[in-house]
Image (cartoon, rainbow, N blue to C red):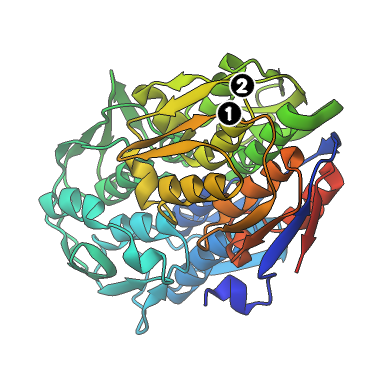
Amino acid sequence: MSAAAAAGAPARYRVQPGGRIAGALTVPGDKSISHRALMLGAIAEGDTHITGFLNGADCLSTARALGQLGVRIEQPKPTEVLVHGVGATGLTGSDTALDMGNAGTAMRLFTGLLAPQRFNSTLIGDESLMRRPMQRVVVPLAMMGAQIRTHDGRPPVEVRGTPHLRAIHYSLPVASAQVKSAVLLAGLYAAGRTHLTEPAPSRDHTERMLAAFGVELGHEGRSIALEGGQTLEGTSIAVPADFSSAAFFIVAACLAASPSLRLGNVGVNPTRTGLIDLLRRMGADIRVHPRPPGGSPGGEPVADLEIRASQLHGITVAEAEVPLSIDEFPVFFIAAACATGETLVRGALELRVKESDRLAAMAAGLEALGVENQLLPDGLWIRGAEGLTGGTIDSRGDHRIAMAFAVAALRAAAPIEILDVANVATSFPGFVETARAAGLGLEAL
Ligand code: S3P
């Protein structure tokens, strides 16, 4: 059982069919940005003050691990954190393994951060994380001189700290912000200038936040360059609401807003908002009201979103669009199931190695709700249905699968029961209350 489940989180949801989505709400802080604010704050000189922090199980795993590494972290309020930076060389080793829980981002970024330290570390996680591929970070880090052992490319990750890494030129084989970030963190400690090239843009929160901490980064076309040995200065970071959490309500509102839904203070970094483009192409009415720049320390663009219902139609998603909405596919597939016509997604192999195999989990769940679909090696084909049936869905312990099927109930003819939902607490504490406030007939059991 995961830590979230052990903490008494609900085991399943029952969602009544139908409903009307309306009002104004703000979803919790961004998970990716919260992890990074903790880690960069830890190795900075001086204090870092974080507001809008995601007080979810994943980010708390990162905070706990940093505590084991000798970093003092205060949390005066659930969404406010003060990190007392220890400087680049101030981390100290932990006698016990660092438990990342369900957090793939934490494990991959910590691998990069810990490789150049003067002590050894072991990284472990929950059942799901222990099955996820880590070789993708080990390969470039090993090229830098890091000494890392895995078990057949999977955790536990055993890092033998080596304070003599060398900068590399590396072309990422997959667009992955986690791999990019792990190499950048190691690159901060390496001798020379690290160059990274991505096959397609992935989220750039690490680059933006490094700049906020005073680090100089070069952007050369699609490459990023970082000189090792730079000092981070503690700063203030305002974490915007997580676009990936907002996504469930964006789709819910497209399906059933009356008259409209407003989502406040949402992070709209263009490397994250691909879902807006996909839904607009399907006919969605989504308005983005940017908040004035300067209001958000940390370098992330923020906006209020206003969504009205519309009849969606199916589309074909191009492979290059996949990284820009990588975490939104579970709920995007629900939009496709409720659209007229066919939707096709290819080039999304990465979805098979997330918290669950998201292609397989979504195909099985849609099948259970009477939606015709075909699981492809690297994607999913869906024929939109007039209405969905009710049914029982196995979320496979994946937070985003669970929340996506809660949204599906808006178009169902009978209740939907969703199993194994404890891990919703990893990214979206308060999901049940927020969903009910928006108009979903959701009950936690
Ligand atoms: C994340 C990057 C993405 C994303 C994950 C968070 C990050 O993973 O799916 O939820 O914070 O860097 P990949 O780097 O594997 O694409």
Residue 160's spot in the image, x, y percent? 19, 70
Is the residue 316 above or below the residue 34 in the image? above
- Would you identify the image quadrant in which residue 223 lies? top left
Amino acid type of the residue tagged 1 in the rendering: Gly
Instruction: Tell me the SS state at disc 2.
Output: loop
- Asked if residue 43 can be seen in this view, the reply is no
Q: Depth check: give the residue in front, 128 or 426.
A: 128
Instruction: Tell me the SS state at disc 1.
Output: loop
For the residue with label 2, is its CB less than 8 Å from the closest atom of ligand 1?
no
Residue 177's spot in the image, x, y percent? 37, 41
**Disc 1 to disc 2, C-alpha distance:** 5 Å
Residue 288's spot in the image, x, y percent? 69, 20
Count neighbours of disc 1 (C-alpha within 10 A) and say few if under 14, some if 14 to 19, many if 20 or more: many
Please indicate whether residue 338 sits to the left or right of residue 225 in the image: right
Q: Name the residue located 32 percent from the left edge and 31 percent from the top edge.
A: 347
Is the residue 256 above or below the residue 155 in the image? above
Please indicate whether residue 226 sits to the left or right of residue 88 in the image: left
Residue extending farthest to the bottom is: 95
Q: Name the residue located 35 percent from the left edge and 51 percent from the top edge.
A: 353
Amino acid type of the residue tagged 2 in the rendering: Thr
- Asked if residue 419 can be seen in this view, the reply is yes
- Would you identify the image quadrant in which residue 248 lies? top right
- First of labels 1, 2 by sequence position: 2
Residue 365's spot in the image, x, y percent? 54, 50
Q: Name the residue located 44 percent from the left edge and 20 percent from the top edge.
A: 316
- Indicate which quadrant contains ligand 1: top left
Q: Which mark is residue 275?
A: none
Q: Depth check: give the residue in front, 242 or 170.
A: 242
Q: Label 2: which residue?
A: 340
Q: Label 1: which residue?
A: 384
